[in-house]
Amino acid sequence: MKITMVKGDITRVKVDAVVNAANSTLLGGGGVDGAIHAAAGPGLLEECRALREESLADGLPAGQAAITSAYDLPAKWVIHAVGPNRHAGEDDPAVLEAAFRSSLDAADRVGADTVAMPAIGAGAYGWSGPEVAAAARRAIESRAEDSRDNVAEVIFVLFNDELERVFHDEFDGYRDEGPAAADGPVDESAEPAEPAARAESPEAADPAARADAPESDGSEGGRADA
């Protein structure tokens, strides 16, 4: 599995599946959650409401993921993952790891080759960058150990230089140390599936329009944080 990190707007990265740092309601919120709903258009909210009515009456629990279509996003699917809210006392790092792993499992089920993923938990939900990066790495390692590697590339789309650096540091040497060593070194210089996405302003999808929605995992102006 190829791992890359970029700073930019996750709603403009062309991939098979984009991971949304959602809240348990699945009805949108702030940050990356609001940006994804705004960029996808009203069809996403309608499908999320139907999903709640049909199978998730109590909401999506932390650590789990749900799949919808991507509508107006440059992707095929949106994978909604709920991280634990540390401010609400949900401080188990295993649940944070599960949110990343559940996202990758969902991507594998739908046959996604490329996945854009935010830093789940690193925004309004109170987890530090190093904690989030470590959880993401553990999730990827656990999948590799289970020989589930249909996802060819994970692109971590991050909202600032510091978080990008933290993820680079966490994954530095992963191919040498981790279970996928035979695949070669991490290509830290490679562009994502849509290189132009790195330069786009995240302001194009304005989560402020959803200010009345429940707080979500996303923050930092709707960029790639969660």
Image (cartoon, grey):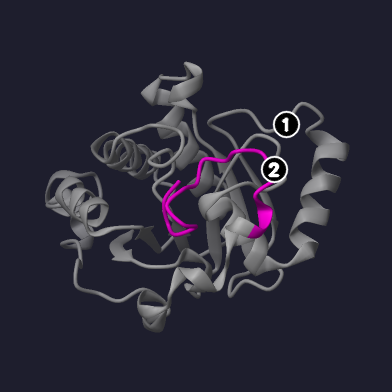
- The count of marks equals 2
Residue pointed to by mark 1: 59
Image point 33% across, 36% down: which residue?
135
Q: Are marks 1 and 2 in contact (CB under 8 Å)?
A: yes
Residue pointed to by mark 2: 26
Q: In the image, which residues are magenta?
A: 209-226
Q: Residues within 10 Å of mark 1 (few under 14, many from 20)?
A: some
Which amino acid type is marked by label 2? Leu
In the image, taking residue 110 as reference, residue 46 lies left or right, namely right
Per the image, is 153 magenta?
no
Q: Quadrant of the N terminus?
A: bottom left
Q: In the rendering, at what x and y percent does residue 92 appear? A: 41, 19
Per the image, is 221 magenta?
yes
Q: Residues within 10 Å of mark 2 (few under 14, many from 20)?
A: many
Q: Residue furthest bottom?
A: 196
Image point 20% across, 44% down: which residue?
178
In the image, taking residue 50 as reference, residue 135 lies left or right, namely left
Residue 139 position (above or below residue 2): above
**Mark 2, secondary structure of its residue:** loop
Residue 60 position (above or below residue 70): above
Q: Is residue 184 visible?
A: yes
Counting residues from the N terminus, which is met first, the one under dot 1 or under dot 2? 2
Quarter of the image where one finds residue 187 = bottom left
Q: Is the stretch drawn in magenta largely helix, strand or loop? A: loop
Q: Is residue 15 visible?
A: no
Residue nearer the viewer, 124 or 105: 124
Quarter of the image where one finds residue 186 = bottom left
